[in-house]
Image: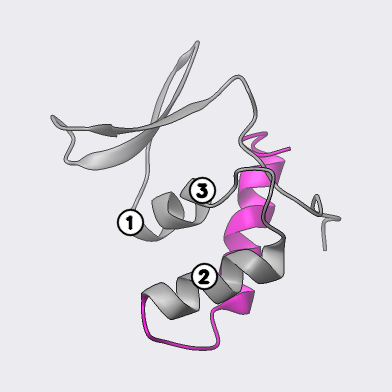
Amino acid sequence: MINLPEHPKLNRLFRLQWEEVQQAYVLLYPEGMVKLNQSAAEILKRCDGTQTIPDIVTSLEAAFSTTDLHDQIVGMLQTAFEKDWIV
């Protein structure tokens, strides 16, 4: 398991934004663009450097009226960290 940052935030080399043409959130960076699915976008929107991982989990579980999202969210954050999307 990767040691994730306590307060994950988007790497300054990436910009998260809604792309109307794609009808999806994307991560823009100097070499290109990554189209995100809804789940990944919702997680990354909360990576603002102020929220902890438990805060993000709680926020998403409340937003989607569900429970047991911790492992899925941490898995996505691990992938994002490996790809340098978050620091």
- The magenta stretch spans residue 22: no
The reply, left or right, for residue 21 in relation to residue 65 is left
Residue at horizontal 16%, vertical 41%? Answer: 23
Q: Quadrant of the C terminus?
A: top right
Q: Residue at x 48, y 12 (%)?
A: 31
Q: Which mark is residue 47?
A: none
- Its colouring scheme is one colour
- Percent across and percent down for residue 35 are 34, 38
| Residue linked to disc 3 | 44
Q: Residue at x 59, y 72 (%)?
A: 57
**What is the x, y in percent for residue 71?**
63, 76
Which picture quadrant has residue 36? top left
Of labels 1 and 2, earlier in sequence is 1
Point out the tag, 3 or 2, that comes first from the N-terminus.
Answer: 3
- Which residue does the numbered mark 2 point to in the structure image? 59
Residue 72 colored in magenta in the image: yes
86 relative to 61, above or below: above
Q: Kindly check if marks 1 and 2 are in contact, taking CB atoms under 8 A apart as contact.
A: no
Amino acid at dot 3: Leu
- How crowded pointer 3 is (Cα within 10 Å; few <14, some 14-19, many 20+) is rated as many
Dots 3 and 1: beta carbons under 8 Å? Answer: no
Location of residue 2 by image quarter: bottom right
Q: Residue furthest left?
A: 21
Residue 15, placed above or below residue 32: below
Vertical order, 17 against 82 (above or below): above
The residue to which callout 1 is attached is 38
Counting labels gives 3
Q: Please provide the residue range marked out in magenta.
A: 64-87
